[in-house]
Amino acid sequence: MLICLLFLTHCEQRINYPQATAGVLDLRNWNFHADGPVPLNGDWLFRPSEFITPAKMTNDSLQSGFQAVPVPQDWNAYATGNSPMGATGYGSFYLKVLLPENTPGLSLWYHRNYTAWRVFVNGRELIQSGTPGKNAGRSKAGFLSGISPAPMGSSGELDLIIQVSNYDYRAGGIRQSVLLGPSGVIYQKRQNIISFDLLIAGALIIIGMYHFFIFLLRRNDRSPLYFALHCLVIAIRPLTIDEQVLYHFFPAPGSHFYLALEYSTLPLSVLTFLFFLRSVFPRDFHTKIIQLLSIPGIILLALPFVLDTLELSKAITLYQAHLLISGLYGLICMILAAIRKRDFSGAMLLGGLPLFLGTVYDVMVSRSIVPIQQLGALNLLVFICVYAGILSIRYARSFKQVESLSTELHRKNAELRHLDELKNEFLANTSHELRTPLHGIIGITESILQGATGKISEETRANLRLVASSGRRLTTLVNDILDFSKATHGDLTIQTRSINLVDAIDMAFSLITPLLRDRPVELIHQRDPSIRVQADPERLNQILLNLLGNAVKFTRHGQISVSMQRIETNMVRVTVSDTGIGIPEDRLEIIFESFTQADGSISRQYSGTGLGLSITRKLVELHGGQISVQSRPGSGSTFEFTLPEGEEIGGTQNQMLHQLDIPQEDADSPAHDLITRSDILTIDNAETTRLERNEKGAQPHDVSGRVRTLIVDDDPVNLQVLKNLLSLRNHEVVEAASGRDALQLIEERPGFDLILLDIMMPGLTGYEVCRILRETHSPSELPVVILTAKNRTEDVVQGLASGANDYLAKPFEPAELQARVDNMLALREAARSQASLAVLNHELQTAYLIQQSMLPAASPRIPGFRIATRYRAMINVGGDYYDFLPDESGLGIIMADVSGHGVPAALIVSLLKMAFLYQSELIEFPARVLVGMNRILYQNTGNEFITACGLFINTRNRTLRVANAGHPPLLL
């Protein structure tokens, strides 16, 4: 409806207006109030090649030199002598208008003619456009229309003279009607046309920008882009024709620019329209034909840069021919699309056909074939609105389909999430079912190796080791499958700490060694004990086992080596090399993908799921490192991965009780050299000692007496494994095959020291059994260790929340089981001893105060030396002691360690202090001091003993004397 209203406002009512005859227009019977403005059409008087002024106009002059010519019409065909006038030239037009009496105030509206003109009314110059001139140099075209008041003469007549010159356009003269009417009506009519042009342009710009933003949202469909460009190009046209809105507001670019802009919209609109139709109907438009039509279009776009205004205006025929030919091709293709029943083809044809016919009509009007006003941009607006509606319907349908597909997608995603949960549960349950027999295989094998069934031969022992190793490898495979599922969902987590890398590699080597059997493969470990890494111990072991397992699998002879090196970015590079079959270069990257091996032939020759390296890369990246591989077929492979460097555990503060700090000015003294050398040697010895203590500390806790342990599992194989392993540790083992049996045994036969409880059991689960136990037994009274093949974090958390003290994942190492059991028993014993320790703590506090009083209150001050002390006892009351005894020549120092701790140690320390003070006269000779103290203390310390180290620093000659009596060497 809006389009129809716009069309009606743009059309004029057909009225039989009076026509001028021989330069006279009689309007005395015209009613301006009722009939409105009147076009001054008809036969005007024209004098070529002369500018007539009002002063020269007389009755005699009208009789000579003037000729009657039709207006509006271009003067190209006016007869001047024996030939037509042509496009360029100059001349004067004259018209006398007879007006009715009592005529209201009138105005004249001079339309744009692309020429220069000047207007005189009743002897007065009123308005001009451009500068009329007698040659091209003096003439300057004006592209604007104009309105001026029409002053009334005393006789009620208007003498109208218009001087016109044209050297810039293909047609001269008065080409559009001069309109006369009431001033208010004339101004309103002109304002309506300007508003209409702005409305058309604004609507086209809005539609274009709307579709441009649609394209930005869906860039895979280019049809909105071409349609948007088409709308923006067409929007320029109403602003450059009729009232020349752009020229009116921005006259600086000049007439040539705006004429070029007007003409350029024709090929641009054609090209954007054809590309739009091709994007909508790609099977009906031929790309080569569109490209062929694009070539002349590009040439036409370039013409304004090489032609002046006059020649450019004459080239309008080329622009119109290209427009009609391209439009005809587009119309034919739309007809074909409609015949082939393409989507929306019928609607687009209904919109495109009026567009093409309107274009033909406008071309005919511009060439004066049809003397009626052009439709201008109105037919384009109708077309654009129709096509915008079609695109809107198209996108509405697409959005509806998207909503439908989104709903379906949400439903499918919900199903997939449910299936994914089922898959995860299936993997967890399957892994549990796999781990249970694996646990049995490994556990029974390990228990037999440890002597549960008596002595076995070396050959049998070697075979059993191979069985255990294979079981562990199968366990690793099960873990890889679970880790792959976790990694896919981003659930793979790590808990890092500082780890000695050498120890981790040694453990990995010990696990893969049985897999080599009799193969001539040498294992090389290039050790650097000082390197530590920040990693998850379990995941680091998994990384090493995957890489070393691959190396063992593909290496038949030669060597497998592991080396480590610090790099600049606080990272550690670990290199695993082998001399195996190698990997083709084109397969180096994909081997880290899931379910992938080097190639098909290797896959057939060597077993494996292809998950190991994929999981390894994810684990390395989870630690913040990277993994890479270098290999050539037949030359082996080298895998390198990086891990963050770990912090040192422990330092010199744990190895020193005090520190002597020599000033810088004494750094070159012999005493300083001696201290430095002693420090280095002592550090080596201290490290060796520390390692020996760690090895001793790693021994299982010795359980004195017979321990009553209840093991609960529905699998007889698991029960046998636990029974074998615990029997070797002097446990009295009681078995229960279900949760209910376990609760009944605890009630009927109380006094169990420990319970090992499986989670997955029929009837009551391990979680439920644990919760029931905690109603009557505290964790310190009856420790519970849950055994589970489901080692997911949520399973462990649920077990601990049910009241378990600890958990152990199946399959487990016998040493790990022993350590967990011993820890639980030790904690239980500690809880039982807590009450008696409360009384002892009071006595220990008293002994602590006594011992603290024996230690020096402050370090002595000696010129040239800075002395600092640090005392750390293993418990509140320890057996460590130190003291100072200065004299005139230097400083004596004693450090001692009394065996034992607590109150006895504190009493012996008091005897030790007195014995040291008695040696003041011998303080310069540490060996004599220790001998003298030994005479005093001998047979006065009961069954305890003391180790000591004495030294004397001579401050005069800067020497150091040291004596040692069973005490570890000093760090100096």
Image: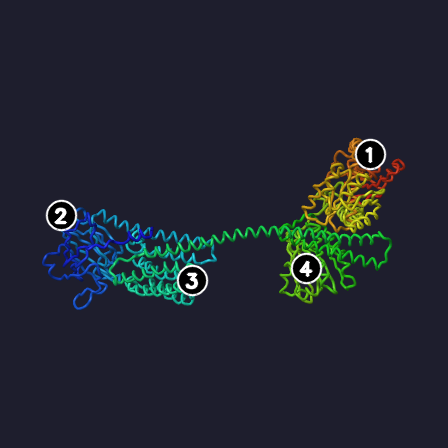
Camera-side residue of 777 and 863: 777
Q: Secondary structure at mark 1?
A: helix
The residue under label 4 is 609
Q: Secondary structure at mark 4?
A: loop
Residue 927 showing in the rendered view: yes
Residue 341, which numbered label?
Answer: 3
Q: CA distance from mark 1 to mark 4?
A: 63 Å
Q: CA distance from mark 2 to mark 1?
A: 140 Å
Residue 101, which numbered label?
Answer: 2
The residue under label 1 is 903
First in sequence, mark 4 or 3: give its number.
Answer: 3
Amino acid, disc 3: Lys
The image's colour scheme reads rainbow
The x, y position of residue 630, in whole percent, is 65, 62
The x, y position of residue 380, in whole percent, is 34, 57
First in sequence, mark 2 or 1: give its number.
Answer: 2
Q: Secondary structure at mark 2?
A: loop
The x, y position of residue 47, in whole percent, is 16, 61
Q: Nearer the viewer, mark 4 or mark 3?
A: 3
Q: Nearer the viewer, mark 2 or mark 1?
A: 2
Q: CA distance from mark 2 to mark 3?
A: 67 Å
First in sequence, mark 1 or 4: give its number.
Answer: 4
Camera-side residue of 279 and 182: 279
For residue 832, side relative to residue 250 (left or right): right
Residue found at x 77% / y 52%: 440
